[in-house]
Amino acid sequence: MSLIISETENAIGTIIMNHAAKRNALSEALIDEITTTLEAFKEQNIRTVVLRAPSGAKVWSAGHDVSELPNRGRDPLGWSDSLRVLIRAIQEYPGPVLGLIQGGVWGGGCEVAMACDILVATPEATFAITPAKLGVPYNLGGLLTVMNMIPLPVAKEMLFTAQPIPAAQALNLGVINYIKPVDEIEAFVYQLAGQIVANAPLSISVMKEELRLLSSARSITPELFERIQGLRRTVYDSHDYQEGLTAFLEKRKPQFKGE
Ligand code: LCV
């Protein structure tokens, strides 16, 4: 059974994440279907993509599929991790990806939403960045996505508390472009998409890539990179990382010891 619904109309593609039983947890299987569809959209010269959950969804995405995170001793967010593959597929798609957000957006799902180029959310939508809840050492690229989208004090609050922020606050911060009621959001998003596909696709896709390259341009020395990787390793090698995974899967509160 497919975990997404996809459709195309007038150079606009739609991908509906449709794994309600797991609250659209970003499993390898779900991510494979999304990235495969994005590749197919590229072949069909789809100029703009809408990424969404089914209308009325209470959860847009529950984030990384925790049951697929590796046990301690292995970087859970390495380059080839499926969540990282999906983030890059969205950021590198040669046309704007519009996030139509309804419901809760959790963890890696938040980063997927923030990898989209334009975000429109319903008033009930919330956004939570949750590595601290699980004991996960977020990766550099992921933190850069967060830093590029959210002012540092609020980014730190979201990362350190792992608590959701409401759509209204996300709008005030400029993380999302619009808030629209559930009975208006679809028409609004597709009208926006229509405006985009009426413009020059080459100009837009190159500007999107220029902005991606400029926003990710940071100088970091090999020594600094290795120091950061060493720090992250102390986290994913830790008791607390294992405890975070185990507690989630056992549906209980984790007991973190700081070791
Ligand atoms: C696997 C799940 C998940 C899930 N994985 O429904 O950003 S990082 O670094 O933290 C990164 C590693 C990451 O993204 O980690 C995941 C962060 N996500 C979260 O912390 C959200 C975890 N999920 C929830 O808090 C709840 O599921 C929400 C509030 C999203 C929905 O609550 P609701 O009561 O509607 P359930 O919790 O009953 O979940 C329904 C089924 O989906 C599974 C969950 O285990 C349950 O499966 P069973 O029916 O087999 O028990 N599920 C939910 N999230 N991230 N599986």
Image (cartoon, helix red, strand yellow):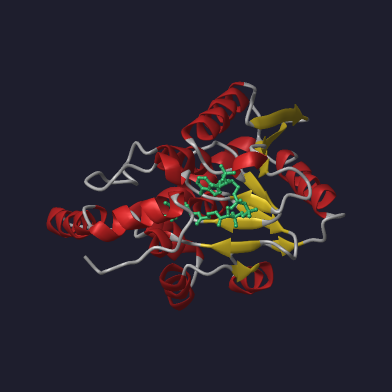
Count of numbered tags: 0
Residue 173 horizontal/vertical position (percent): 59, 72
Q: What residue is shown at x 59% (from left), y 21% (from top)?
A: 43
Outermost residue, right direction? 183
Task: Judge from the rendering whether residue 57 lies leftward or rightward of residue 257; answer left or right.
Answer: right
The reply to whether residue 217 is in sight is: no
**Relative height, residue 10 to residue 60 (above, below):** above
Left or right of 239, for residue 170: right
Residue 18 on image: x %, y %:
67, 37
Residue closer to the observer: 140 or 160? 160
**Residue 148 percent location from the top left of the image:** 46, 62
Where's the C terminus, which quadrant?
bottom left
In the rendered image of this protein, does residue 199 appear above or below residue 183?
Answer: above
Q: Is residue 63 above or below residue 256?
A: above
What is the quadrant of the N terminus in the image? Answer: top right
In depth, the one of 159 and 46 nearer the eye is 159
Q: Where, by quadrant of the figure, is residue 169 drawn?
A: bottom right
Q: Residue at x 32, y 42 (%)?
A: 70
Between residue 97 and residue 55, name the one nearer to us: 55
Q: Residue at x 73, y 28 (%)?
A: 7
| Displayed quadrant of residue 15 | top right
Q: Residue 205, percent across and down?
A: 56, 40
Looking at this rendering, what residue extends furthest in the left direction?
A: 223
Q: Can you say whether 195 is above or below 215 in the image?
A: above
Q: Residue 168: tell me if it is visible.
A: yes
Horizontal arrangement in the rendering, residue 74 relative to residue 27 (left or right): left
Looking at this rendering, what residue extends furthest in the bottom direction?
Answer: 153
Residue drawn at point x = 39 percent, y = 58 percent:
134
